[in-house]
Image (tube, rainbow, N blue to C red):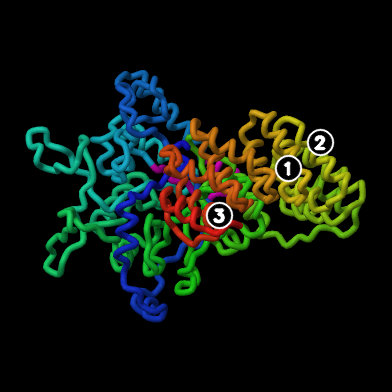
Amino acid sequence: MHRACLPIVALCSLASMCAAAPEPAPSPEQLRKEFPPTFNWPDRRPIGTIFLAASGKNWPGNPRGYFHDEKLDIRTEQGRADLRTRMLKVADDAIAYTREVGGQGVIVWDLEGGEFPHATTYVGDPRVLPKVAPEMDAIADEFFRKFKDANMPVGICIRPSKIVFKDPSDPTKWAHIKTAYGHTHMVDPVEEVVSKIDYARKRWGCTIYYMDTNVTLERDAAGNMLRDAQDKPKLRLLTAAEMREIQRKHPDVLTWPEFQTPGYFASSTGYGEFHTIADIDVKERAIYPDAFRVWATRMQEDDIYRDWDKFLAAGIKQRDVFLFQIMPVKNGMGPLLQRAYEDAASNDAPPRDLDALITTARDHKSWALRRRSIVALGDHKEPSATAALAAIVEKNTDALELFAARALAKQNTDESFKVLLAMLEKPGRPAFAAAFGLGASGRAEAVAPLIRAFEATKEFQTRWAIIDALGELKKPEAVPMLAANLRALAKGTGVVSRVKTIRALGAIGDRAAIAPLLEALADKTFEPQRPLIARALRQITGIASESQSEAYWRKAVSTQPNR
């Protein structure tokens, strides 16, 4: 998957450290007393993200990887002029698109580019821009001025570490850094963060900040650096007191750190990722009722539409903030969030009269009311209702076709089922929507047409929808095809297809899926999906283990009684 689709990559060691050394857990009353809420950010509209660069490409003419363009040559005057033109267009497009989808502002994740691979990729220090990316430094003021002139909040990524540069004459200094520059935690993290915010606010007016890798050195009472058993420096999360001090210095900015403890939410918010709707949960609201997170989705948009009411209830109505992508490509989250905010705010009910219901579903200006009317048509089995829904499935591309397909499945008539099967044979969006609807039909006779459609189409989104539908139907007849697909994916790069196929096999729960899942667990190319494979095996076998070891699962399965 493209790096920009997975923007925040936490170091495994840091994640382990954060889990192993949390702050003491006082009671909610103690926490509120020690850290009373001082943070107030009433604007909960979504925020657009800009990822400018590819990392670690080492392109001679474009060492920072801007625009993922190997042919861009910033060594030449023409190349630098081209970079300026493209950056200013990015600003104009971002402002227009953010307004279009109802966002509150924009954050540029990698202003300094991506000269080096993870974990140096996100530099997070605007102060070193003149040195690490002079070609961007020459453009940055003009770029950010566009947001200021448009009265649109804008921000950048920062880190509490300090960028230091290698000295070729003294290779022993900063020996842990293997590139021209890197991060050190030999600083006061509060002072470092405040200084970076000072700089970005004064120069560009930035008021939105993602704080990447919010850790620092662990020290004893005398200030001495602590080391672990391998003689490596121990790291810890910034404390709630340190976050409070940062917020005290800059009370009117939005800062969301990668990792959090409950006390953070007195003076800031926090970053979160959701792979399922159930992940959207801010337990800290029990302590701080106005707490929220800034969420990045790891779901496909169709998966969110499938659980639409749950998404509205868990996220939008709880006033969380969600990110949508502007660059390198605009994904579907911007329009999805625009629709979600409209839907959550609307109290309009669909008409009861069937003719009025059909007219509203087809023609009303409100997306939210059209959606509700489409859903209500699913309760009507009249041919006119089926025909109206069929027309929406065939013609719409604004996600209403997905709700119309589910409404046809809800009708559960022979005619509505025939409509879905007919749409499945059409190219493009109708087939995608039909698969989306057939998954909700509960009909075993939908499996064979879905498999035929999967084998006949090369449209990857339609294939995704078919895989999801087979998983939702939970029919064992689909396992051989899904198992074959999983084996074929070992030779490809279809991450989304892998994830969906593994989840579908787990959802079906048939033991015939164990063998292909174990094969995938043993295959190094499936390493990123091992947690999902283990989860699928738990679903199928009922074995309550978090192990991701193929040897463990083979033994555990072999000792289970025959079922």
Decide if residue 289 is in sight here. yes
The answer to whether the residues at label 3 and label 1 have Cβ atoms under 8 Å apart is no
Q: Amino acid at mark 1?
A: Val
User: For the residues marked 3 and 2, what is the alpha-carbon distance in whole angstroms?
Assistant: 31 Å
| Secondary structure of the residue carrying numbered label 3 | loop
Q: Residues within 10 Å of mark 1 (few under 14, many from 20)?
A: many
Q: Quadrant of residue 166?
A: top left
**Residue at the image position 24 percent from the left and 54 percent from the top:** 192
Q: Which residues are magenta?
A: 95-109
Extreme residue in the left direction: 169
Residue 422, label in figure: 2
For disc 3, the marked residue is 276
Marks 1 and 2, how far apart in space? 14 Å
Q: Mark 3 or mark 1: which is in front?
A: 1
Horizontal placement of 423 versus 518: left or right? right
Q: Amino acid at mark 2?
A: Ala
